[in-house]
Amino acid sequence: MQELAIFGGQPTVTAGMIKSWPPISQEDRDAVMAVFDSNIFHGTGAPNAVALQQEFADFIGVKYCLVTNSGTSALHMAVASLGIGPGDEVIVPAFTYWSTAAAVLHHNAIPIFVDIEDDAFCIDVNKIEAAITPKTKAILPVHIHGMPAAMDKVMALAKKHNLLVIGDACQAHGAAVNGQKVGTFEDTCGFSTNRSKNLSSGEGGFFVTNNEDAYRIAAKLREFGEVVVHGQTREYNAFGLGWMYRQHEFINAFCRSQLKHLPENNARRKEFAQYLTAELANIPGFKGPYTPPGREPVFFSYIVRFCPQELGIDATMAEYKAATQKILAAENIRLGQWQTRPVPGQSVFQMMEGYGKGCPWTCAHYGRKIRYDENDYPVTLKFIASHAYLAAVYPPNTMDLMKKYIEGFKKVASQPDKIRKVIADARKA
């Protein structure tokens, strides 16, 4: 039996074996440098902006696309372009990155949270109906970690209650349900191209829709509330409240180059994830993610579930998780976590200060008193407590690294007494 690295053995994964995301080619560099030669650096009518919008619209399968300077701005546009505003409620999953709910607050509407599924980690459609009130205007499912939500059920429920649907696909470029890509089900949808995302450009995003009215409103919101017609003299007249959500040409050019490789990069992520999940199924103490039938994830994050009971370890989930993460880190196998509490448990929702003086909750257009308690979302709490995300499950890393990961998990799982020792040492500290 190999000694664990934490006790002086050799690490399973050698230093320098792990490569960073995204893969960057000479083609990417040439695309960015060509912007200097064009001398066109910004503008919604700039050539790379216009081309990127069409290329991403074609990839997703929607009529309209607007490139933005972030996924959060795209989500704000997705909310605002549908006429959602003061006094309106939008149903949001309790497990997401908080900018999902921020996009609702940014337009003076109220996030109403719903717990997630027991087996996957998207919004639990069976719990949405109980959260609907006369003030509900939309459902905002999140395709979190690259796992698409149950969109067929979401759309059926929205139709039943005459609600709009806004998508948060910031982590799900190319994910699909029964062959249909996310971003095409919803009335409006936002994507991010932050460096970490499946489609990476450093920072940026997309607003997409099949609704022409929403598209035209979003275009005004993106550019100061103005109507800017390319090729015509700019009027400099704001027709309503708007923001500066444009993207610049260096990012657009980089994103266009990266988009060419998105299908193959997603395919590699799926290949890695399928291998890891199949192997972890036979290793006690750890499990990979569950994919519900009909859903086609793109594995923005690879989820690992901690299962101390399978090793007969008498410890809390927190103790087991901390110990095995520490042991695996010594093997150069890193598991991290970006969300440590349900969004309604974060300070912004506990203090409910909003814009100041309690707005938008104290807005005269609202008139309801609500409270946010993270304990109302037990499945989200359990998921956060029992899961973490395995690093570098993406190209340019290779299957050799995935095999080393599995070797490391087997090495750790085969020595439960050593796990118990790390737990015991932590208790004494």
Image: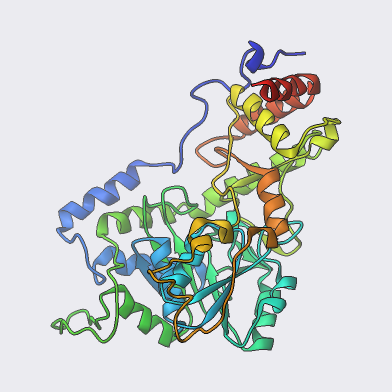
Give above or below for 42 relative to 369.
above
Give above or below for 301 relative to 171.
above
| Residue 379 placement (x, y as % from top left) | 72, 57
Quarter of the figure with residue 256:
bottom left
> Farthest residue toward the top?
8
Q: Is residue 186 visible?
A: no
Residue 401 or residue 152, whichever sits in front = 152
- Give the colour scheme of this rendering: rainbow
Q: Is residue 213 visible?
A: yes
The answer to whether 172 appears left or right of 161 in the picture is left
| Residue 146 placement (x, y as % from top left) | 59, 56
Please give the name of the residue rendered at 57% of the width and 35% of the height, measured from the top-left corner: 398
The answer to whether 226 appears left or right of 352 in the picture is left
Q: The C terminus lies in which quarter of the figure? A: top right
Quarter of the figure with residue 139:
bottom right
Residue 290 or residue 315, whichever sits in front = 315
Please give the name of the residue rendered at 64% of the width and 27% of the height, measured from the top-left corner: 328
Q: How many marks?
A: 0
Please give the name of the residue rendered at 29% of the width and 51% of the height, measured from the top-left corner: 31
Q: The N terminus lies in which quarter of the figure? A: top right
The answer to whether 83 appears left or right of 118 in the picture is left
| Residue 239 placement (x, y as % from top left) | 26, 87
| Residue 20 placement (x, y as % from top left) | 46, 36
